[in-house]
Image (spheres, rainbow, N blue to C red):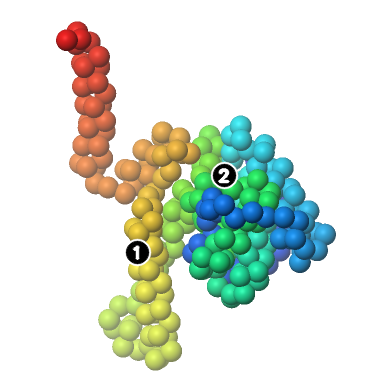
């Protein structure tokens, strides 16, 4: 599995297709129709990438693996670039862009994809370093742990945790800050603002450290205990058990 994953990462990184950050790469079902002309601007290789996406999505209806999701990176980047071209914009935002992106997704039957998963896949593919960190994390996992990391959203959250921690570690002390050049100070301030913006975006989108629908129970438990204090984690566990206990009591009560 590790060898297969490494091959997937290498192919994606080598393509060098990282695009502008995604903000509205979500395929809303807003009634936009599509036809053959939506991909007329693509070459034969790009069309084949999109065709393989459609075939892979049909297979994934019976279950998904993170490697399957990562394989969508090139195709989603092609769709994003094409949607921006059709919308006459250089940024992936705005209603017209969103409509064009949705039409391209629907053309290949991908409009049923989870919206957060699509955004997370594009985010992971934007910078090679993100995929490299993901590979390091998965290489350190047991086969069972790797098989349970199915959600690209959870993968994104793990990478963001690492990058945020590295940003905090790299922040200069007051003494070091005094010795920085104006350009170095500006770069440090930009990095810190980017980190805060990322936190605000996750909060605004209701982001979490795990995906309740796609992650396994032990992966969710790990996400909780890594994010809260031991006392709060125990309270959460006790609250869940108490809820089920109360439900059983109510089921045993005679009607009327």
- The residue that appears at 57% across and 60% down in the rendered structure is 99
How crowded is the residue under tag 2: few (<14 C-alpha within 10 Å), some, or many (20+)? few
Residue 135, position in %: x, y?
Answer: 58, 52
Decide if residue 72 is in sight here.
no
Task: Give the percent coordinates (x, y) of residue 130.
Answer: 54, 61
Q: Distance between the residues labelled 2 and 1?
A: 27 Å
Q: In which quarter of the image is the N terminus?
A: top right
Q: Can you tell which quarter of the image residue 167 is in?
A: bottom left
Q: How many marks?
A: 2
Q: Which residue lies furthest to the top in this view?
A: 254
**Residue that mark 1 sits on:** 200
Q: Nearer the viewer, mark 2 or mark 1?
A: 2
Q: Earlier in the sequence, mark 2 or mark 1?
A: 2
- Circle 1 residues within 10 Å: few <14, some 14–19, many ≥20: few
* Quarter of the image with the C terminus in it: top left
- Helix, strand, or loop for circle 2? loop
Q: Within the image, what quadrant is residue 253 found in? A: top left
Residue assigned mark 2: 112
| Residue 213 higher or lower than 14, as above or below | above
Farthest residue in the bottom direction?
182
Quarter of the view holding residue 243: top left
Drawn side of residue 163 relative to residue 171, left or right: right
């Amino acid at each position: 599995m590790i060898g297969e994953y490494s091959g997937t990462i290498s192919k994606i990184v080598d393509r060098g297709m990282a695009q502008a950050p995604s903000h509205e790469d979500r395929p809303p079902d807003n009634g936009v129709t599509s036809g053959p002309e939506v991909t007329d601007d693509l070459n034969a290789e790009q069309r084949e990438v999109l065709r393989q996406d459609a075939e892979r999505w049909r297979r994934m209806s019976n279950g998904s693996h993170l490697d399957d999701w990562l394989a969508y990176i090139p195709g989603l980047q092609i769709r994003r670039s094409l949607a921006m071209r059709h919308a006459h914009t250089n940024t992936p935002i705005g209603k017209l862009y969103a409509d064009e992106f949705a039409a391209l997704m629907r053309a290949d039957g991908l409009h049923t994809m989870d919206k957060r998963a699509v955004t997370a896949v594009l985010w992971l593919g934007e910078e090679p370093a993100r995929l490299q960190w993901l590979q390091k994390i998965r290489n350190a996992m047991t086969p069972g742990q790797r098989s349970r990391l199915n959600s690209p959203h959870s993968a994104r959250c793990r990478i963001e945790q690492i990058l945020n921690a590295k940003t905090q570690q790299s922040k200069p002390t007051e003494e070091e800050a005094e010795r920085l050049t104006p350009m170095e100070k500006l770069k440090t301030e930009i990095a810190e603002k980017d980190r805060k913006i990322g936190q605000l975006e996750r909060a605004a989108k209701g982001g979490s450290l795990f995906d309740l629908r796609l992650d396994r129970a032990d992966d969710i438990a790990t996400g909780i205990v890594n994010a809260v204090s031991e006392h709060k984690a125990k309270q959460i566990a006790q609250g869940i058990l108490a809820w089920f206990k109360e439900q059983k009591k109510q089921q045993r009560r005679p009607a009327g």
